[in-house]
Amino acid sequence: MTDKTMTKAAAKADLPPTVVLMHAQTIHSVDEPGATEVVVRICSEPLTGASHREIATAIATAVYDAGLDAKITRFYVTSWIPVGDSIEQGDPLRIDHFALYLWGPDVPDPDSRWKTRMED
């Protein structure tokens, strides 16, 4: 899977007008050979934890719905926030075993799956 393929899948997410998908990066997992780790970067205004989880869930659902032929392990969604002449990174969210979950409108409370980078 390529970065371009992942970005195209993530771009199908229904995002608020204040959030722009920048790109997705795919990395071969060091922990699980044959698996892929994904980092999706968005540009946004400062986000609350709940709104960041909702946006991350929308992106994860779009990637899941794309039916990509790759085993995804870790899945990150990071928010980059313009501040004056610079950009600051918000707290990233992650899921450690993305391929083990179902995503979609009938799945109960998918937003609760997300962890911050500091959580175990």
Image (cartoon, rainbow, N blue to C red):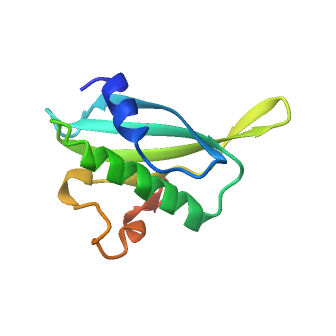
**Residue 19 in which image quadrant:** top right
Near-viewer residue (49 or 9) = 9
Tell me the residue at 75%/38% (across/down).
82
Of residues 7 and 98, the one nearer the viewer is 7
Residue 100: give x, y in percent of width and height. 19, 58
Residue 79: percent from left, percent from top: 59, 45
Report whether residue 96 is seen: yes
Taking the view exactly as shown, the residue that stands out farthest to the right is 84
Give the residue displayed 65% in from the left and 63% down from the top: 48
Q: How many marks?
A: 0
How far across and how far down the image is residue 87, in percent? 72, 34
Horizontal arrangement in the rendering, residue 60 relative to residue 82 (left or right):
left
Q: Give the position of the C terminus as an image quadrant.
A: bottom left
Left or right, 46 with respect to 37, comes to right
Q: Quadrant of residue 84?
A: top right
Report whether 12 appears left or right of 74.
Answer: right
Above or below, 22 relative to 45: above
Place of residue 83 in the rendered image (x, y in percent of width and height, measured from the top left):
80, 39
Decide if residue 112 is on the left or right side of residue 35.
right
Q: Residue at x 71, y 49 (%)?
A: 45
- Location of the N terminus by quadrant is top left
Can residue 118 be seen here?
no
